[in-house]
Structures are given as C-alpha cells and as structure tokens.
C-alpha cells in the first residue's frame, strides 16, 4: 500500500524543528498535566550552548545531530464525490483519499543530561 506524502512549498521549504531531550521527568506541585502549557524559557549562549530555565532551575545542554531525521506528519482526508467504490454488498461508498502532509523535519536534538542547578537570588545579609 502506498500513501502519498505531500511537502508544502516543495522539498527544502519545510520548517526545521528540534527535540528537547531531558533526563528524568517533570512534575508539578499539584499534579496537573503539562500538555499545552508554558514550561520554561530556552536560550542559546553566544557559543551556541542551549540553556533551559524552568521555574527556579537552570539546565545547560548541548546540540546533537540525529543519526536519522524524523518527519512530523499530519494525516489528511479528502472526500471525492466522483469516485465511488462498490463494497462487498455491491452498495456505493464514497471514496476518501488519504494523504499525509509534512509539517516539519527534525534533524537535531537539544540534550540536557545534567541535573538542574537552582537559581539563587543575591540576598544581602542583615548586619
């Protein structure tokens, strides 16, 4: 079975994403899902070192190339009225055309494998 894959704008025009690879897990205080929520800030130093700030913690990472790139695909259905297919009962069915649209290509990952360091504000001591 062959499924057509369409690249919007042609080859080489697809946006490029990266994967953030964290060692361990992220937990919230009240055990709510982090899906679709703001997690933190991602910055790069002048030497292209990724820095991730989550709450009061900072993580330093490195940029790695993936051995095999990934494609992020979205499945699309389009109904065609002029193509009818007879099923086993010899009744007409509307033919649906399925194809996949390439949303992005992932070629790099940002690896954060060290433990997070706490961000401590400079609090003056009372004399």
Image (spheres, rainbow, N blue to C red):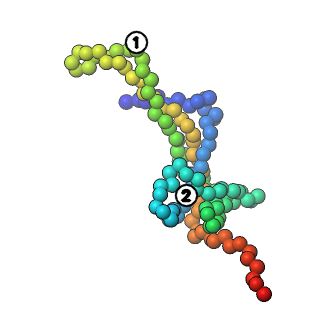
**Image quadrant where one finds the C terminus:** bottom right
Residue drawn where x is 62% and y is 43% of the image: 16
Front residue of this view, candidates 78 and 54: 54
The answer to whether residue 49 is above or below residue 12 is: below
Neighbour tally class for label 2: few under 14, some 14-19, many 20 plus, Cα within 10 Å: few
Is label 1 in a helix, a strand or a loop?
Answer: strand
Residue 43 image offset from top left, x and y in percent: 69, 56
Residue 27 left/right relative to 57: left
- Quarter where residue 51 is shown: bottom right
Residue drawn where x is 73% and y is 59% of the image: 45
Q: Residue furthest bottom?
A: 127
Q: Residue furthest right?
A: 127
Residue drawn where x is 55% and y is 58% of the image: 21
Which residue is denoted by mark 1 in the rendering? 82
Q: CA distance from mark 2 to mark 1?
A: 47 Å
Residue 124 image offset from top left, x and y in percent: 76, 79
- Quarter where residue 50 is shown: bottom right
Can the viewer see residue 55?
Answer: yes
Residue 81 image offset from top left, x and y in percent: 40, 14
The answer to whether residue 3 is above or below residue 46 is: above
Q: Earlier in the sequence, mark 2 or mark 1?
A: 2
Residue drawn where x is 70% and y is 57% of the image: 44
Is label 2 in a helix, a strand or a loop?
Answer: strand
Q: Which mark is residue 21?
A: 2
Residues at circles 2 and 1 in contact by the CB criterion of under 8 Å = no
Q: Residue furthest top?
A: 82
């Amino acid at each position: 079975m062959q499924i057509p894959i369409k690249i919007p704008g042609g080859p080489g025009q697809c946006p490029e994403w990266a994967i953030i690879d964290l060692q361990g897990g992220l937990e919230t205080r009240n055990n709510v899902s982090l899906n679709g929520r703001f997690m933190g800030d991602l910055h790069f130093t002048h030497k292209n070192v990724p820095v991730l700030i989550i709450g009061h913690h900072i993580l330093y990472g490195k940029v790695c190339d993936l051995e095999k790139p990934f494609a992020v695909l979205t499945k699309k259905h389009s109904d065609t009225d002029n193509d009818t297919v007879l099923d086993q009962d010899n009744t007409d069915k509307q033919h649906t055309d399925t194809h996949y649209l390439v949303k992005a290509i992932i070629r790099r990952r940002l690896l954060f494998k060290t433990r997070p360091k706490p961000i401590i504000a400079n609090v003056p001591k009372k004399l």
